Image (cartoon, helix red, strand yellow):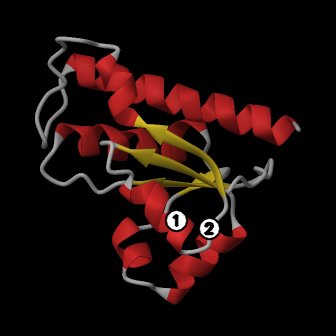
Amino acid sequence: MTGQISPSLVLIVTCSGIGKVHGLVSREAVYHLTDKLLPGQADTVCLALLATGDPETRQKVQQTPCITLDGCPKLCAYKNVELSGGKIAKGIRVYDTMKRHHGANFGTATALSEEGWEVVEEVAAEVVKIFRQEAAT
């Protein structure tokens, strides 16, 4: 399912990825986007609330185009948005970005290294690019 991105708002739904550096990269990318790169244009929802069927969260993903960020190939964010009837504008696998940095040490599940922060920046830049391209159409 593909939805169009409004020039005013997109939801970025990320995997929780607790206990894994992939999840931390995903979450930090969302914070970077909502706080610095797209303030007022990007928001997020709690994946746990979406997965448990919270009505307000489901309504939000159904009414607002979503970009999902998944840390691993399980695609939990993408699948939960899709199962909730959400509008997915684009799904991004953070794992794929990390693979391009073969041999890098990204940090741990609780603290990113400099290379981990570089991946956060790359993922955030990819989301901004998608947002701007889709908003222009």
Give the x, y percent position of residue 73: 33, 43
Q: Nearer the viewer, residue 132 or 89?
A: 89
The picture places residue 17, in percent across and down from the top left corner, at 24, 52
First of labels 1, 2 by sequence position: 1
Q: Secondary structure at mark 2?
A: loop
Q: Is residue 5 above or below residue 92?
A: below
Task: Say whether residue 60 is left or right of residue 44.
Answer: right
Residue type at mark 1: give it. Val
Cα distance between the residues tagged 1 and 2: 5 Å
- Mark 2 Cα-neighbour bin, 10 Å: few <14, some 14–19, many ≥20: many
- Seen as rendered, the residue at the extreme bottom is 55
State the residue at coordinates (62%, 80%).
59
Q: Quadrant of the N terminus?
A: bottom right
Q: Residue visible at 50% across and 45% down?
A: 35
Give the quarter of the image for residue 80: bottom left
The one of 115 and 102 positioned closer to us in this rendering: 102
Left or right of 83, for residue 104: left
Q: Which residue is mark 1?
A: 81
On screen, residue 101 above or below 37? above
Q: Around disc 1, counting alpha carbons within 10 Å, would you say few (fewer than 14), some (14 to 19), or many (20 or more)?
A: many
Q: Are marks 1 and 2 in contact (CB under 8 Å)?
A: yes
Name the mark on residue 86.
2
Percent x, y for residue 71? Answer: 32, 42
Q: Secondary structure at mark 1?
A: helix
Residue at (68% x, 58% y) in the render: 65
On residue 4, the disc is none
Q: Quadrant of the C terminus?
A: top right
> Which residue is found at the position 25% from the left and 38% from the top?
22
